[in-house]
Image (cartoon, rainbow, N blue to C red):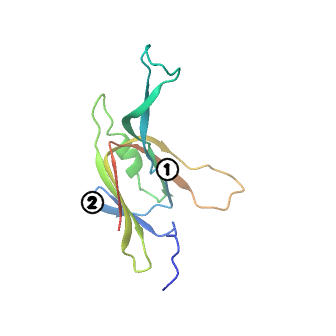
Amino acid sequence: MPAQYPLPVFHFTVQWGGQRVGFTEISGLTQENQAIEYRDGSFPEYSSIKMPGLRKFNNITLKRGIFKSDNDFFNWLNTVKLNTVERRDLIINLLNEQHQPVMVWKVHNAFPVKVEGPQLKAAGNEVAIESIELAHEGLEVQNE
């Protein structure tokens, strides 16, 4: 029987509005159920009960290297108007050695809430990285 190892995090793709875009880092793939606390004044216990409440999805942050004349992040951020914005579905695939998805996150109705440029350093020796923070309305996880 071959040894079982956890999946490495460094081999992934992002489908971004129908096209594949390369990113260096993704964080915030988090979902939680918020707890509701309740206590009736006649409860014999002097503590509240807890029950499941609303589901909450954290914002997702994606980072990538900056390329000349690539303004996709800022162009998408500029679609935000008073109560409208261009929303996109994203698919994030964690890949195996054969470049096949083994774990998939489907992000629903995402829109940008923050775009951050690179940290500029005169003595720096790294790639310029920009990031985009996305709010969304749901996260589906498929572990193949």
Q: Position of residue 22 (x, y in %)?
A: 43, 63
Residue at position x 52%, y 69% in the image = 8
| Residue that badge 1 annotates | 131
Q: Position of residue 48 (x, y in %)?
A: 48, 24
Q: Nearer the viewer, residue 53 or 131?
A: 53
Q: Position of residue 137 (x, y in %)?
A: 32, 42
Q: Decide: is 59 above or below 39.
A: below
Residue at position x 34%, y 64% in the image = 20
In the rendered image, which quarter contains the C terminus? bottom left
Q: Decide: is 73 above or below 43.
A: below
Q: Decide: is 59 above or below 142.
A: above
Which of the 4 image quarters holds residue 21?
bottom left
Which of the 4 image quarters holds residue 126?
bottom right
Disc number for residue 49: none
Residue type, label 1:
Ser
Residue farthest bottom in this picture: 1
Residue type, label 2:
Gly
Q: Nearer the viewer, residue 12 or 116?
A: 12
Residue farthest right in this picture: 123
Task: State which tag comes first along the sequence, 2 or 1.
Answer: 2
